[in-house]
Amino acid sequence: MKFKSKLLISLMAVISIIALVIPGCDIGTGAAGDNVYQGSGYSNGRVPIIDDGGELSGDSDLTFSGDTLTATKFAGDGAALTGLPSGVTAGATFPVSPTYGQMFLHTPTGRKILYQYDGSMWVAIEALSNVVVYVDNGSVTGTVGTDNLNHGFGTGINAFATLNYAWDMLPATFPSQYKATIILAAGTYNETIQTSDTYGASNVNIVGATITLLTSTAIGGLAGSGANVPYVSGTFLVGQYDKKLLKFGLDHTGAQGANYGKVCPISQTTTTAIYLANTTLPIIPSNGDQYEILDWATTITGNWLLNTGSRFVVFNYLNLTATTKYQSYGNIIWSLNTIAAFYYCNVYSATVDAFLADEKSLIVAYYCVLGGCVATLGGGLDLEEDVIQGVDNATGYGVSTDRNSVANVVACSISKFDRGVSTNINGVASLIDSGIYNRVYGTGTGLCAFSSGVTIYQNTVLGLNPDGTSNANGGDTYADTGTFALVAQN
């Protein structure tokens, strides 16, 4: 009797401990005297999870309903999945003899994309991870990729052959937490890209290659501010590195100084200095500071039409050089009701403007070399630390806005245009810490406004060249006051 009492007391103590360890745990009896452990406050179908403290909890991302387990995400190699529902298989290469309606999770290196076979081809359904693909047409490397879905996972022969194919293979459904990256090998791609009207897609990064033209050390320089354009001192040829990129390396002590890694477009090269865009460097370049001169190694000769609702495209280190307008209207880049961003790119041609931001679209360009930039019909331009250059002895506008469009210009060098900035028909432009240089004609104007256009400027250089010499061509400002236009200094 004493033994039974002690055992009963011991069991009651264990039950009390369980109740304390598991919050909301109700221990009772079920049919035939079976113990029932009931957790209050948990939703039906939740899978119990033990946390770091040993307590049970539930997670809405993992649930059971009958014999079906539902998970929000899957991490791991899709090729290792077993027991996939109804005909769904997974792997790095596609099945040889697919059947109509078959589902396949494609899992080569760099991507996981769900496909369905429509009887003649595999159709991308949804991206289930970030997507990274490579393109190489062999024009520089000598190694040509192949345009089929089992390629694109690596460089050389493992790459795709064309940019168009890489773009078109991206699935229409791209969850917001994922992005796509297309890496272009060095080469010239004679392709024109017209994006489709694709909604719900995440952003796409397109990345090109560069080559190093010069590795050297500075003998001094200027950080730049306002009318004082930043430069790196040395011995050069006139025009030698115009419209290239300068990248700062280790400083004169061998350390990663304040300028380390900064990349700036070059506006002008003289015999003694390389002048940069109108930025202010973090620190004055010192004698012995290392730098490189970079040129673009990936060139796309066709136009880009970024169409209504297409993916947000980010261009990096690309040389975009189309020489004709797209459909006799668009420029090298024509954006319609969408957003595009450019970093460290050369978007320049002697015959065609760089950008047309059309119909409520927005084009962002930082640290680029650009031709003329145009915004119209509610379009917008956000330009920062760019070199914007025209062609000697040719008319044209550096930045132009009209019909309720807007341009924001910060720390840019604008040169070799008949008119540096022009606003018209309710267009607006704002300039800060920029410079209008090398105006072409005696009738040229730095900043002008027509037909209710508004141009506002602050700390902007007018009437000088980047090296500080005078440029007396034309006037600094002009506003057609008869049509309520305005050019004003803030």
Image (cartoon, rainbow, N blue to C red):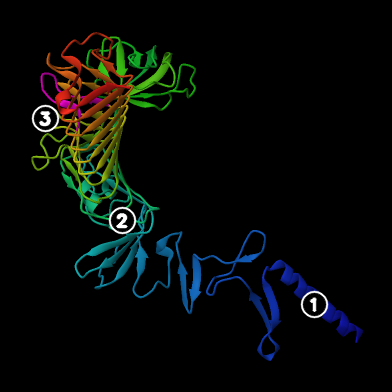
Q: Nearer the viewer, mark 1 or mark 2?
A: 2
| Label 1 – label 3 distance at C-alpha | 90 Å
| Label 2 – label 3 distance at C-alpha | 35 Å
Q: Give amino acid for label 3.
A: Thr
475 or 482, nearer to the observer: 482
Quadrant assignment, res 415: top left
Quadrant assignment, res 341: top left
Q: Is residue 80 magenta?
A: no
| Label 1 – label 2 distance at C-alpha | 58 Å
**Which element carries disc 3, helix, strand or loop?**
loop
| Residue that carries the numbered disc 3 in the rendered image | 351
Residue 439: mark in rendering: none
> Looking at the picture, does residue 250 appear above or below residue 464?
below
The image position of residue 104, as x and y in percent, is 32, 66
The image position of residue 4, as x and y in percent, is 86, 84
Q: Nearer the viewer, mark 2 or mark 3?
A: 2
Quadrant assignment, res 136: top left
Quick check: 248 left or right of 43?
Answer: left
Please report the bounds of the magenta region as a residue range: 387-401
| Residue that carries the numbered disc 1 in the rendered image | 12
| Residue that carries the numbered disc 2 in the rendered image | 200
> Looking at the picture, does residue 42 appear above or below residue 363?
below
268 or 214, nearer to the observer: 268
Q: Quadrant of the N terminus?
A: bottom right
Does residue 294 appear in the picture of this structure?
no
The image position of residue 146, as x and y in percent, is 22, 51
- Which sits earlier in the primary sequence, circle 1 or circle 3? 1
How many residues crowd mark 3 within 10 Å: few (<14), some (14–19), many (20+)?
A: some
How many residues crowd mark 2 within 10 Å: few (<14), some (14–19), many (20+)?
A: few
**Residue at image coords 18%, 46%:** 193
Q: Quadrant of the C terminus?
A: top left
